Amino acid sequence: MSKKTIVLAEARNGELRNVSFEAIAAAKEIASGGEVVAVLAGDVVSDMASQLYAYGADRVIAVENESLKHYTTDGYKQAFLQVFDKESPEAVVLGHTSIGKDIAPRLAVKLDAALFSDVVAIESEDELTFTRPIYSGKAFEKRSAASDGPIIVTIRPNNIVAQEKDESASGEAESLSVDVKDLRTIVRDVVKKATGGVDLSEANVIVAGGRGVKSEDGFKPLQELADLLGGAVGASRGACDAEYCDYSLQIGQTGKVVTPDLYFAIGLSGAIQHLAGMSNSKVIVAINKDPEAPIFEVADYGIVGDLFEVVPLLTEELRNVLV
Ligand code: FAD
């Protein structure tokens, strides 16, 4: 049965996040021939509409309002509920990002919708079924809706493949004005950390270091490898606790959950709490001087050796091949 499906697209610093294109692909699967409408909210967003068409949206709605310049739970909830009032979607898809995790349950309550969170795969043949990891990624469960009511789905970045970009598909955003009022919180200013580079949660290649890197400087060879491969640097909590790097790099149960195509686990032991954040990576390469380190149990490729010798050699070899 076809379902009119809304995608709540997400932009950061004026650029759409990849997960929004993946959400359109997920929405197509859920809509099963029904209309897929992408919604962009912010102060000035309509210029990003063409990309959403290029990735498969049938329509794009721009909700522009000065109060939506920065994300607030109150403001975005009010805006999206007004969009839903007008559009009456049967399904809503968004990224399982900080914003998605915050707003999806609130929208689900308001819409009396079934919520499927952190979805990594969707099947639509006989019945719409959503696969999501449970027990920190040690098992997967499949869920489907118990009734025909609306559904809300958050998708984990880097799992559902976006459609091929079709540059010939284009269009203008439809503008929808919303009334945003009585906000309980106002964002006065956003102070960015000077990390820059590739976004860890969406990176295709992650080079993660642990306590074995021994110092802040010890991360430099890892950064070089990441830069060469267009990837991002991550860390174990051991490295963060030792103040070798910032906690924003932490991967694991109490850090970020990532699913890159390639994950380098360097000088980290592979504690269960770390595996919870990265064990679903497509290819894992472990570098550790201890052959008994548990990380080798989940690694596709393992190198037993001193990271300060192995990483520069690997970077040099890769540079010869790639550059
Ligand atoms: P270690 O376990 O000390 O491992 C260091 C590794 O480096 C060793 O295997 C060693 O052989 C290797 N090594 C040392 N020198 C070299 C060298 N020169 N070359 C090559 N290898 C070398 N941890 C996380 O990562 N993420 C989380 O989100 C997280 N959440 C947690 C939540 C809770 C409630 C708890 C209790 C713990 C959590 N932890 C988390 C901590 C986790 O249990 C481990 O303590 C932590 O992951 C260990 O970090 P590590 O692997 O860097 O350090």
Image: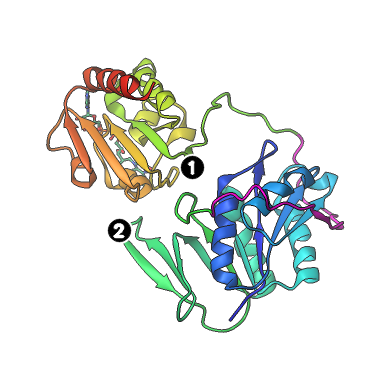
Please, is residue 153 above or below residue 48 in the view?
A: below
Q: Residue at 60% of width from left, 71% of height from top?
A: 31
Q: Residue at 60% of width from left, 63% of height from top?
A: 105
Q: Which residue is mark 2?
A: 138
For the N terminus, the quadrant is bottom right
Image side of residue 199 versus residue 263, left or right: right
- Three-letter residue code for mark 2: Lys
Please, is residue 141 above or below residue 244 in the view?
A: below
Q: Which residues are magenta?
A: 163-188
Q: Nearer the viewer, residue 154 or 189?
A: 154
Q: Which residue is mark 1?
A: 201
One can see residue 311 in this view: yes
Q: Nearer the viewer, residue 277 or 13?
A: 13
Residue 206's image quarter?
top left
| Crowd tier of the residue under label 1, counting other residues whose Cα lies within 10 Å: few below 14, some 14–19, many 20 or above | many
Residue 204 colored magenta?
no
User: Which x, y percent locates residue 149?
Assistant: 62, 80
- Three-letter residue code for mark 1: Ser
Q: Main secondary structure of the magenta part?
A: loop
| Crowd tier of the residue under label 2, counting other residues whose Cα lies within 10 Å: few below 14, some 14–19, many 20 or above | few
